[in-house]
DNA sequence: ACCTGAACACCGTTCAAGT
DNA sequence: ACCTGAACACCGTTCAAGT
């Protein structure tokens, strides 16, 4: 058997577990999906998951990386004439994973894998929004604080599964109050 | 034995369980405290808790009502010259229960007791902040949206256990941007 | 009415045994 | 290296039995 066949197989099995976990976690939430059910969906024995992942949290962290890197790339590729439209489109996209956001903040405290992913994600989101605000001409001294406010507002909209109508009202009001040309 | 002795006893035992749960939940979080440990702290058998509460979520909901009604009363009694000081003082107080906030948002989906408490709490907080903003002279048309933004920002500060310094920068910037006399 | 010991159906995880 | 059956130590909750 060729030497390069093994890594291929391993990667495939790994990805199958992640695919099953992604679908189940996004649909039903982290706590509602047991390792046994996840294993069944991936067509393996429950303990086989531990050959590929340290624990359940590491599966979650991988799913999160998976999901959000797609949204991240989509954001970078997206081109909207108005900032408000881009922001709303991004919030609407992230709603897909809204069921996992509170779980991340809860498990942060016990799982270092989740902790690391969370901190990393916030750093990336901060850089992205910070950059966006500076382009829009926000005062240098206020950029950091306003970035945090925008992130917390987005998180709030996601956590509370806000309707598109409410999201619009919130984002529009916020950007307008910040005297940005929306 | 007098007829009015029973309800007294029952209330006492009930309160002992809540007191034990409050201390443990605030210190270690909801998931980290098992019913067995809670029962031990209250000096009873694990299943005895179910004589007083429907399930673990109902214990949590009771603790939340307990904790936040204190903060609520304290807020109403508080008298600060500047709105920014009152807001910061309130946020600092709520940090006591920050460990439970994400848990509430997670368990919302499965527990109706938590769901009801959460919706009620948001309604109260909305009314409070809405009233505060109108006193400060915010445009009628924007009050609702700005109220939500403020609530989401406060929740964000709590969820991420922000330092007092960051809390100050965020709140100050937000109130200033809203053209309020802070 | 109140409390409990024992049991139930699960959970995430580990480990020795297989290939 | 990869996978599993069986077991482990827990979990929240239920129930029959006690007072």
Image (tube, coloured by chain):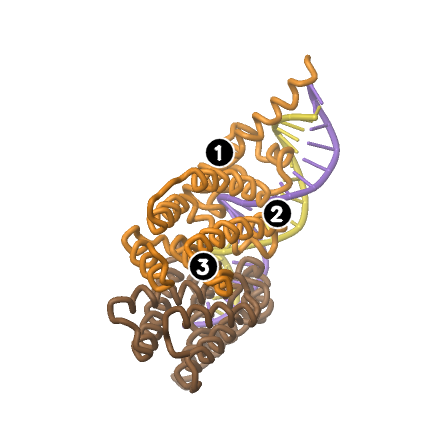
Chain colours: A orange, B brown, C purple, D yellow
Q: Is residue A80 above or below residue B86?
A: above
- State the residue position of label 2: A113
Residue at mark 1 to residue at mark 3: CA–CA distance: 30 Å
Quarter holding residue A12: top right
Query: Between tags 2 and 1, which lies in front?
Result: 2
Comes first in the chain, label 2 or label 1:
1
Q: Which mark is residue A20?
A: 1
Q: Position of residue B21 (x, y in %)?
A: 53, 69
Q: Is residue B65 above or below residue B73?
A: above
Q: Badge 3 local density, few (<14 within 10 Å), some, or many (20+)?
A: many
Query: Between tags 1 and 3, which lies in front?
Result: 3
Q: Position of residue A147 (x, y in %)?
A: 47, 58
Residue B56 in sight in this render? no
For the residue labelled by badge 1, is the local secondary structure a helix, a strand or a loop? helix
Residue A72 in sight in this render? yes
Identify the subunit bearing mark 3: A
Q: Which mark is residue A152?
A: 3
Identify the subunit bearing mark 1: A
Quarter holding residue C12: top right
For the residue labelled by badge 2, is the local secondary structure a helix, a strand or a loop? helix
Q: Residue at x 63, y 50 (%)?
A: A112
Comes first in the chain, label 1 or label 3:
1
For the residue labelled by badge 3, is the local secondary structure a helix, a strand or a loop? helix
B53 or B160: nearer the viewer: B160
């Amino acid at each position: 058997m060729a030497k390069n066949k093994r890594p291929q197989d391993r990667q495939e099995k790994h990805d199958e577990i992640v695919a099953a976990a992604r679908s189940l976690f996004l649909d039903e939430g982290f706590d509602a999906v047991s390792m046994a059910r996840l294993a069944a969906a991936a067509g393996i024995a429950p303990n086989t998951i531990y050959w590929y992942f340290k624990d359940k949290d590491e599966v979650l962290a991988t799913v999160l990386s998976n999901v959000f890197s797609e949204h991240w790339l989509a954001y970078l590729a997206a081109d909207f004439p108005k900032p408000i439209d881009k922001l709303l489109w991004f919030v609407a996209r992230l709603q897909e994973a809204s069921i996992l956001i509170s779980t991340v903040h809860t498990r942060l405290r016990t799982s270092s894998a989740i902790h690391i992913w969370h901190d990393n994600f916030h750093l990336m989101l901060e850089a992205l929004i910070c950059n966006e605000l500076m382009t829009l001409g926000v005062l240098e001294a206020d950029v950091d604080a306003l970035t945090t406010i925008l992130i917390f507002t987005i998180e709030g909209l996601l956590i509370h599964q806000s309707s598109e109508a409410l999201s619009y009202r919130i984002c529009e009001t916020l950007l307008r109050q910040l005297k940005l040309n929306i």
